[in-house]
Amino acid sequence: MNEKVIDGNSVSLKEYFDTKIESLEKATVVAASGMEKRLEGMNEFRDQLKDQTSTFVVRSEHDAIMARVNEDIRILRESKAKMDGKASQLSTNIATAIAIVGLVLSLLGVFRNNLTPFNGNPPTPAPSQMTK
């Protein structure tokens, strides 16, 4: 009863259990080395995440930066509106100046025709006025 039959050979129970224990120890070593490699890979991944996380911007810093950016955008929009208003005012001023010059020239033309000095000869009437 102290023997076991394996592959047609008779083996003592002590040898059988020693062989089983030895194979379990080998399997444990292999499993432990595999687990160690896996844990090393996980530690490397964890270190990479830690390095990446250290480069992230903190929410409060992000909010402060965005507040400054939004303020700068508001200032630029106001400046653009002022420039557009100035450009529109300049166009209005130029149009007004051209209109005044045109009015002055037309008034000069009207007064020139009506105020030309009489050269001593009476104006000749039109032929239709001569028959009267």
Image: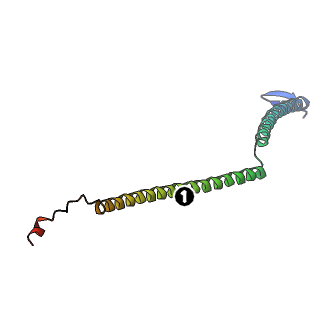
Q: Amino acid at mark 1?
A: Gly
Q: Horizontal and vertical percent for residue 93?
A: 48, 57
**Residue at 78 percent of width and 52 percent of height:** 60
Vertical arrangement, residue 116 with respect to residue 4, above or below: below
Which quadrant of the structure image shows residue 44?
top right
Considering the numbered disc 1 on the image, is that residue within a helix, a strand or a loop? helix
41 vs 89, left or right, is right
Which quadrant of the structure image shows residue 77?
bottom right
Please name whichever residue, 131 or 110, is drawn nearer the observer in this view of the structure: 131
Q: Horizontal and vertical percent for residue 39?
A: 81, 37
Q: Horizontal and vertical percent for residue 22?
A: 87, 29
**Residue at 76 percent of width and 46 percent of height:** 57
The quarter of the image holding the C terminus is bottom left
78 vs 91, left or right, is right
120 vs 19, left or right, is left
Please name whichever residue, 28 or 106, is drawn nearer the observer in this view of the structure: 106
The quarter of the image holding the N terminus is top right
User: Residue most toward the left?
Assistant: 131
Q: Which residue is mark 1?
A: 85
Q: Horizontal and vertical percent for residue 18?
A: 89, 30
Please name whichever residue, 25 or 85, is drawn nearer the observer in this view of the structure: 85
